[in-house]
Image (cartoon, rainbow, N blue to C red):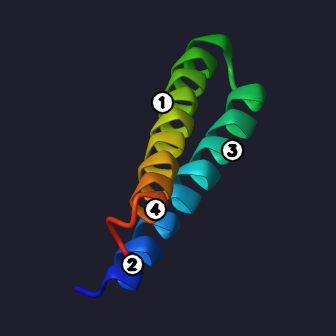
Amino acid sequence: MQDSTLIDETTALAIILFMTSSILSFLSMRKKRDLNDRLEKFADFMFLFGLLVLFLTTMMVTFNIVK
């Protein structure tokens, strides 16, 4: 696997996680209270995981782990 491909793939993963988080947050505003809490909690998890993936990608580029 080429290094640029790794950066592309991790960035794509972060985008998918952020989009999923956005959709789940939107759905949580439209659903009943019990489902609302579960959707919002899962949306928070997806958002934080997306931030972690984006952070790791940035660190790989910054410290020349991936050129």
N-terminal label among 1 and 3: 3
Amino acid type at mark 4: Leu
Q: CA distance from mark 4 to mark 2?
A: 19 Å
Query: Looking at the image, which is closer to me, 5 or 41?
Result: 5
Q: Secondary structure at mark 3?
A: helix
Relative vertical location of residue 1 with respect to residue 35 in this rendering, above or below = below
Answer with mark 3 or mark 2, whichever residue precedes in sequence.
3
Judge left or right: residue 49 versus residue 21.
left
Q: Quadrant of the C terminus?
A: bottom left
Residue holding disc 2: 67
Vertical placement of residue 5 versus 23, above or below: below
Give the structural element (helix, strand or loop) at label 4.
helix
Q: Which residue sits at x=60%, y=42%?
A: 21
Dot 4 corresponds to which residue? 13
**Residue linked to disc 3:** 22
> Real-space Cα distance between discs 1 and 3?
11 Å
Q: Nearer the viewer, residue 30 or 52?
A: 52
- Residue contact at pointers 3 and 4, CB within 8 angstroms: no
Q: Residue at x 56, y 28 (%)?
A: 44
CA–CA distance in space, label 1 to label 4:
14 Å
**Which amino acid, by three-letter code, is at mark 1?**
Phe
